[in-house]
Image (spheres, helix red, strand yellow):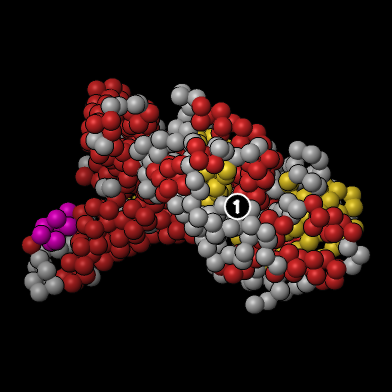
Amino acid sequence: MTQLITEGLVRLDANLGASSTEVINRLAAAVVDAGRAVDVDALAADGIAREAKTSTGVPGGIAIPHCRSAAVTEPTLAMARLAPPVDFGAKDGPADLVFFIAVPEGADKEHLGLLSKLARSLVKKDFTAALRAAPTPAAIVELVEQAVGTPVPAAVPAGAAAAGAAPAAVAPAAPAAPAAETGRPTLVAVTACPTGIAHTYMAADSLVAAAEEAGVDLHVETQGSSGATALPPEVIAAASAVIFAVDVDVREKERFAGKPVIQSPVKRGIDEPAEMIQEALAAAKDPNARRVSATADVSGHDTVGADEGFGAKLKRALLTGVSYMIPFVAGGGLLIALGFLMGGYTITEFADQITLNNSLWNLPTEYPPQAWGPLGAYLGAVAFKIGALSMSFLVPALAGYIAYALADRPGIAPGFTAGAVAVFMGAGFIGGLAGGLLAGWFAHWLGTLAPPRWLRGLMPVVVIPLLGSIVASGLMFLVLGGPIASLSAGLNSWLGSMTGAAALLLGLILGLMMGFDLGGPINKVAYSFAVAGLGAGTVAYQAPWQIMAAVMAAGMVPPLAMALATVLDRKRFSLAERENGKAAWLLGASFISEGAIPFAAADPLRVIPASMIGAGITGAMVMSTGVTSQAPHGGIFVFFAIGNFVMFVVSIAVGTVVSALAVLALKRYATRKAVA
């Protein structure tokens, strides 16, 4: 196993800049110079993104910026003793000791255990004093190697060790005796941070030290990158309250069901451990204290703290719903495009008949003339049908997992049902959002009730799904469906009356509609208007095929623009968004506007206006240059059905570039620049 730190990774009494961003950039450069990472910008961006989530400054003039990054080739530690110190967000002032921990995406547990042990050593005053007094980089390296190679005295009771980690403040003690036997109150805690390297273990040690000073028995479960050993059930049962010092999901949260709970970000466990201990003791005596829900899901998905704001809850729920929805969009959309390519652009008329009545041993005799023969027609029909069925789950999955994010597993059934009702009512993407939120919040509220003991077992599997479905889906039927249907009808009537409108204006309007809600009711109104025109012209002075081309080209712009934006300025997007950007290239090329939904859900006030601008320009260009499309779907894959294909591509390219530049400009204007 290679060294975590070398003399070349140490900077003593150095001026690395005036901000945490500058320091991280300089230390990232040191890691690359040492041959342990391949891209300074990428590594620095990942470190800065982690810093933006939660500042890494801790009491005692210490900062531990850290990240996982695909740019890192082996686990590495870079250290700087700063002169002057730099503010990393600690309450007691700037940091003069900075350890930058850079870990590859697939780091092994042995390395992660050593890094986590170093983090725990930094809460020891004698160790930090030695670091400040060290005369040379070689002395720093020796101190660090001693810290990670020498067992730390046991401090955290049983169950706190991370599996596979080096010995670290853990004693393999027997389960604690109940508080009544020891004369001391008993608490349990879980600590976890996004990377699971530093804050997870430092918070555990800080809480244990504070508990010891307060005369409390505290048992900590560290859910870190190197694994976790669950607290024994008897230890949890004996505890009077639980502390969650976490920034991520608590695994198997239902183990703590019914316990009074104090929840805060993991950094508070480092900065204010004594306060958290006292709050937990007070909660244990308060019959009205917040408690871990009896319906907590096995995955521990719900990590909402008592102080989480409405906006944060809403954003978390939307992102959860979108993340579970994306596989349906990606797989279904590409299969639909493949079906058009093999089976021809009229495969929609034959798909049901071909898939029901034919097989590889009985190929169809009637099929679209554009198909790749009978075999191509059959395979195209199968691909189209599978894709269409997959896409039919899009809105229910979105709504179901939004509700799941708000109410755990009991919210899934009401959410899926409300999403299905949204599809039935023609409410689309926006209806799914509304139905999921209604189902989730109502199911969550039901979960906060205190039913009789005999009813508790039925609440998550019968009562909450039943009542949640009735309320959320009932509201969709009785309240929301009518206005959405009226809106759709009104838009259709308005478009149909524009018989004298200029081609450019009509294309602009259709493009704006396609870019507005990305597969929702307004988008679908424009699309339905175009498809209806393929059978009979509805606008006297414009060919229906031109309208279809404008709608399809405009609908391709939002996902393509988001994909391009992630390439032009990747630091403006999270790792998940960058990964979604890769898929968005294919989704956009296939005319799957929903490929931009992950970006719109995370940042609607910037993404949606930018998408509308580019889509509107594309729609106007297509209509004004006479581009036509005889195919109702398929994007670039139905090139054979598009007239004036060159201008079709040019129009899409122009709109894509405009939207990409617009969203980047909006992100830069509204947020602080990420990298100095």
**Residue 582 appearing in the image:** yes
Residue appearing at x 35%, y 26% in the figure: 449
Q: Is residue 353 magenta?
A: yes
Near-viewer residue (369 or 227) = 227
Tell me which residue sits at (67%, 59%) in the image. 153
In the displayed structure, 667 sits above or below 348; it is above
Q: Is residue 128 left or right of residue 281?
A: right
Task: Please identify the quarter of the rendering in which residue 78 is found.
Answer: bottom right
Query: Over which residues does the magenta segment extend?
Result: 349-356
Quadrant showing the N terminus: bottom right
The answer to whether residue 242 of the structure is visible from this angle is no
Nearest to the observer: residue 126 or residue 180: 180
The type of residue carrying mark 1 is: Val
Residue receiving disc 1: 156
| Residue 337, picture quadrant | bottom left
Spot occupied by residue 562 in the image (x, y as percentages of width and height): 52, 50
**Percent position of residue 21, x then y:** 75, 50
Report the residue at 24% width, 22% height from top: 478
- Residue 532 part of the magenta-drawn span: no
Residue 167 in percent (x, y) is at 62, 64
86 and 564: which one is in front?
Answer: 86
Q: Where's residue 13, x and y in %?
A: 90, 58
- Single out the residue that lies furthest toward the bottom: 1
